[in-house]
Amino acid sequence: MVKITDVARHAGVSPSTVSYALSGKRPISAATRRRVEDAIRELGYRPHAGARALAGRRSNVLALVMPLRAGIHVPVVMGFAVSVAVAARRHDHDVLLLTQEEGEEGLRRVADTALVDALILMDVQLRDPRLPLLRSLDRPSVMIGFPHERNGLTCIDLDFRAAGEACVEHLAQFGHRVVALVGSPPEVYVRGTAFAQRVVQGFTAAADRAGLSCAVHPCEATPAAARRVAERLLREQPALTGVVVHNEAVLEPLIDAFGELGLRVPADLSVTAICPDELAASLRVPVTSVALPAAEVGTRAVELLMAQLSGEEVPDATLLPPRLTRRASTAPRPA
């Protein structure tokens, strides 16, 4: 295990100087601070949690790790970021936003330099490569999302599996027998992104229970892709009368495409979505939807971190139940 004396020797300074660089209790020159930070990074040094607590060293900064990967709908994830920032300010904390796809290296760099008190991670994958490092860090963390193996982690999110089920159950109650899921862009599924995979699981499970014919179609986030998917659905499922959309960027273009192909919503085709309420309610035909509770998830993620920083026990898993709001886009299956 690397010790503070090893860092001091590597940087050519005294152990007390390393301590001052970490704690900020005394001013040191920028050049000396850089040498200390370089040595910390190169040696992989992490201050002992107990020592940090005794020193009372807090940055009052939370890291929000939100990689802007391909297929991510930026307006939606920024809603989560804003909610985290607003909640953090209520607790006198600022937010350091990390948007690069840096994986373990980005997490290690932030943790090793003591820039932040705690971390919130988004865009969680079912088999997320960041998990081993996250479990080894000496500071609290919360994941907005549920990996496959979450032992030793604190996770919060909308219950996306139940959200997929709720959309199908709503269509089944209206008598629809042939349904389809227009999902996230293909790269989101290739990465194994947890929320997208769980929507598919819920959609197919509910369709199977109700005896519905179903299909899943990933869709690029462009109007042209929405048109291609609509054409393919009508070609492969000519009896289609119900669609679930889990792709905010194509919700309106998809409805337009079906209209151009001769299907009226909801007279010929019922449409449900998993998306922000603001989007669903603003469309020409307001869409029945399960809301994405960005404000609640972000706020509760920050509260979980604050509780951990205070030494309190917190639940390992917090799943928010889906809330479906019926609007004008769903109706009984046409005769």
Image (spheres, rainbow, N blue to C red):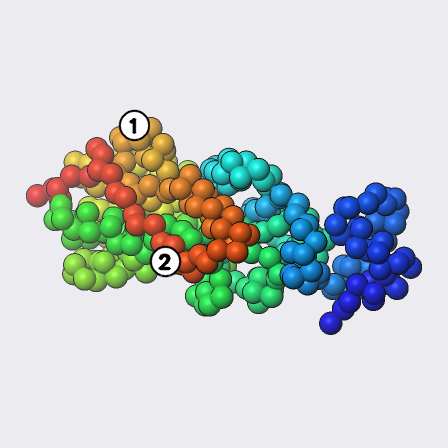
What residue is shown at x 82% (from left), y 45% (from top)? Answer: 26
Q: Closer to the camera: disc 2 or disc 1?
A: 2
Q: Residue furthest front?
A: 54
* Horizontal arrangement in the rendering, residue 173 relative to residue 297 (left or right): left
Marks 2 and 1 sit apart, C-alpha to C-alpha, by 29 Å
Residue annotated with mark 2: 198
Can residue 282 be seen? yes
Residue most toward the left?
335
Q: Work out which quarter of the rendered image holds the C terminus and state it.
A: top left
**Which sits in the foreground, 71 or 241?**
71
Quarter of the image containing the N terminus?
bottom right
Amino acid identity at mark 1: Arg
Q: In terms of sequence position, does the residue under pointer 2 or pointer 1 come before the other?
A: 2
Q: Nearer the viewer, residue 70 or 316?
A: 316
Left or right: 132 as drawn, with respect to 327: right
Residue under the point 65% across and 61% down: 50
Q: Please give the name of the residue rendered at 46% of the width and 43% of the height, measured from the top-left corner.
A: 298
Q: Position of residue 251 (x, y in %)?
A: 35, 39
Q: Residues within 10 Å of mark 1 (few under 14, many from 20)?
A: few
Q: Is residue 217 visible?
A: no
Residue 263 versus residue 44 in the image, above or below = above
Q: Is residue 142 above or below residue 284?
A: below
Residue 284: which disc? 1
Amino acid type of the residue that numbered disc 2 sits on in the rendered structure? Arg
